[in-house]
Amino acid sequence: MIALFLALILLPLFPLSMLFNAGLQALPVWLRAPVLLACPIAGVLLLDRAAAPPEQYITPLQLLAAFTALLYAWRLLAVQEVFIWARLQATSAWPLVWLAWLHGLHGKALMFVALAVTIPAALLMVLGSSLSERLGGAYLGLRGRIGPAFPRLTCALVLTLLAALAAPPFPGFFAMFAVLKQIPAGLATVVLAVWLLWSWAAAILWQHGLFGKEWPRPAGAVDLSLSTGLLLMLAAVAAVLASIGGWSWWMH
């Protein structure tokens, strides 16, 4: 039960998720992404060691996980700041790890699910910091196209958002199918609704930052370097290939 309680702190469900988000917001910018990555890794390791909860707790845990996932997916619709979007999306995704675990998913498959839905959120935090550095306070009220001013940064943002909303062929897509394959039909409806809300929220974010009047480049601001852009592209390709290979291996 101790391992289960610690896992609840690291992969928080409501209302612990409120404390987690407040704590993450209070951390220095450079520490937020590493903490976001470390929590699900440690949480899954604890879940693998934890015994299954007593029968009377399974249904409440499932309902709480479903409510948490839907609540934070719905909150994404009103968010324009990339860092807040990233942490809320991760908070919405982690309950799906709980649902998969409660229905028998363990080990490497569960770790794959946790990382596939968390790594894009961590990358979004890094890109959000890059946007904030380049646009300053105006970033919070972002309206208009930033692509002409920062083409490589915009490309990285679009690809990372696609990965975060679990679009094919990114790892999150296969992770969502792994969860759907594991859980019963009633919970699968909740997961599909969460998935739809992620896509809707990402579309709103794209509308604010990729369309409309062209955003002028502030004096002294520069785009991502070519080497950084290429590195991100290679990482995206490697993630796609690894997830496709891993999914094929798991299905067989």
Image: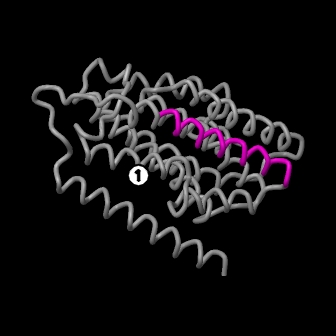
Front residue of this view, candidates 182 and 165: 165
- Tell me where residue 89 appears, x and y as whole percent: 55, 38
**Which quadrant of the structure image shows residue 73?**
top right
- What's the residue at 58%, 52% (across, down)? 44
Question: In the displayed image of the protein, which residue is found farthest to the bottom?
Answer: 252
| Quadrant placement of the C terminus | bottom right
**Range covered by the magenta-colored residues:** 185-205
Relative to residue 32, is residue 86 drawn left or right?
right
Front residue of this view, candidates 205 and 182: 205
- What's the residue at 56%, 35% (across, down)? 201
Relative to residue 232, is residue 185 drawn left or right?
right
Q: Residues within 10 Å of mark 1 (few under 14, many from 20)?
A: some
Question: In the displayed image of the protein, which residue is found farthest to the right?
Answer: 56
Q: Is residue 143 above or below residue 97?
A: above
- What's the residue at 43%, 30% (across, down)? 208
| Kind of residue at badge 1 | Leu
Name the secondary structure under disc 1.
helix
Q: Main secondary structure of the magenta part?
A: helix
**Does the magenta portion include 97?**
no
Residue indicated by mark 1? 159
Relative to residue 148, is residue 185 drawn left or right?
right
**Does the magenta portion include 186?**
yes
